[in-house]
Image (cartoon, helix red, strand yellow):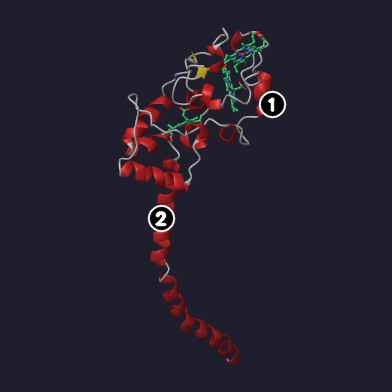
Amino acid sequence: MPEEETSRAPETDEAAAAPKAKKRNKKWVVPTVVVAIIVVIGVGFFAWHNTPGFCNSVCHSPMDTYVESYSSGDQGMLVTAHAEAGLSCLDCHEAKLNEQLTEVIAWSSDTFTTTADGHLVDANVDRFASPETCLKSGCHDWNDVVDSTWGFDGNDAKYNPHSSHQDGSVQCSDCHKSHETSTLYCAKCHDMNLPEGWEATTDAA
Ligand code: HEC
Ligand code: HEC
Ligand code: HEC
């Protein structure tokens, strides 16, 4: 039957081409599996990297103090309310490759110093408790913050830590401390109620 023959001819061609195609496909099996494994490890590592436990799993010193503060329940530390809200270290400490490399180098060459209570000595911590960090979108809205803190913690309504004659001279970090006890700068001069767990600023004027 000539009809069958014509229809078989292309089939034979395909059959001849098939082993070639299969062979070509096989070459990708090993790389694909390797890539899949790397992706799975990468995703797993990324998820772990996002948890507080990651930070002190390798760098016990100096990270233990910070990780402990995260679960201390101490209301005087800013980290507590954020931990209770389910935020992690990296929500406030945006992972930046250059900073992470600097950290790894400082850690592995042991060129960091800590205070007696285990905090890193770093003149630059103001960058974390800053408008850039706290007021980024999805976090806090400045107008809401100001509106909600007139007469804070049972103080006279004229007192607002975010709107006063001190504006411009005090930084967020002069009051808000994440891993240490927060301090109310205004209480240096005014007799005010302190938020739970806070202290009055003791810095010299
Ligand atoms: C003079 C001290 C002081 C300074 C400076 C300060 N805060 Fe506050 N902040 C407070 C106090 C006090 C509260 C009320 C805390 C409480 O009752 O637990 C507060 C509360 C907040 C809250 C929570 C408000 C709410 O909605 O309940 C946010 C957010 C906040 N501050 C952000 C900032 C940011 C951002 C800066 C810097 C731009 C800043 N603060 C500077 C003292 C200060
Ligand atoms: C609410 C935001 C917030 C969260 C969540 C947070 N931190 Fe911080 N962190 C800060 C701020 C603000 C500072 C600046 C010093 C301070 O306020 O105590 C800081 C300082 C640090 C420092 C010192 C940095 C330096 O350069 O000296 C380390 C280390 C650190 N945090 C680690 C952690 C780890 C680890 C976690 C999670 C277990 C964490 N932080 C969670 C806000 C946060
Ligand atoms: C260095 C000392 C000092 C600090 C710190 C300070 N104040 Fe004052 N404040 C004064 C003095 C002095 C006056 C004017 C004298 C007065 O009337 O008590 C004043 C006046 C005021 C007034 C006007 C109403 C009043 O009681 O006379 C308010 C409101 C006020 N301060 C809020 C604040 C807030 C909020 C903070 C923290 C962000 C703060 N102050 C920090 C010294 C200070």
Measure the C-alpha gap from mark 2 to mark 1: 45 Å
Q: Residues within 10 Å of mark 1 (few under 14, many from 20)?
A: few
Numbered marks: total:
2
The x and y percentages for residue 7 are 58, 86
Label 2 residue SS = helix
Residue type beneath disc 1: Asn
Label 1 residue SS = helix
Dot label at residue 78 = none
Q: Nearer the viewer, mark 2 or mark 1?
A: 1
Q: Which residue is mark 2?
A: 38
The x and y percentages for residue 101 are 41, 47
Residue type beneath disc 2: Ile
Q: Which residue is mark 1?
A: 143
Q: Residues within 10 Å of mark 2 (few under 14, many from 20)?
A: few
Compare marks 2 and 1 and give the one earlier in the sequence: 2
- Residue at 51% across / 82% down in the picture? 14
- Residue at 48% across / 45% down in the picture? 96
Q: Residue furthest bottom?
A: 2
| Ligand 2 within 8 Å, label 2 CB | no
Please say if 56 is above or below 42: above
Please say if 91 is above or below 187: below
| Ligand 1 within 8 Å, label 1 CB | no
Image quarter of residue 139: top right
State which quarter of the image contains the N terminus.
Answer: bottom right
Please say if 152 is above or below 64: above
- Residue at 60% across / 89% down in the picture? 3
Residue in front for this viewpoint, 71 or 160: 160
- Left-right relation of 108 to 19: left
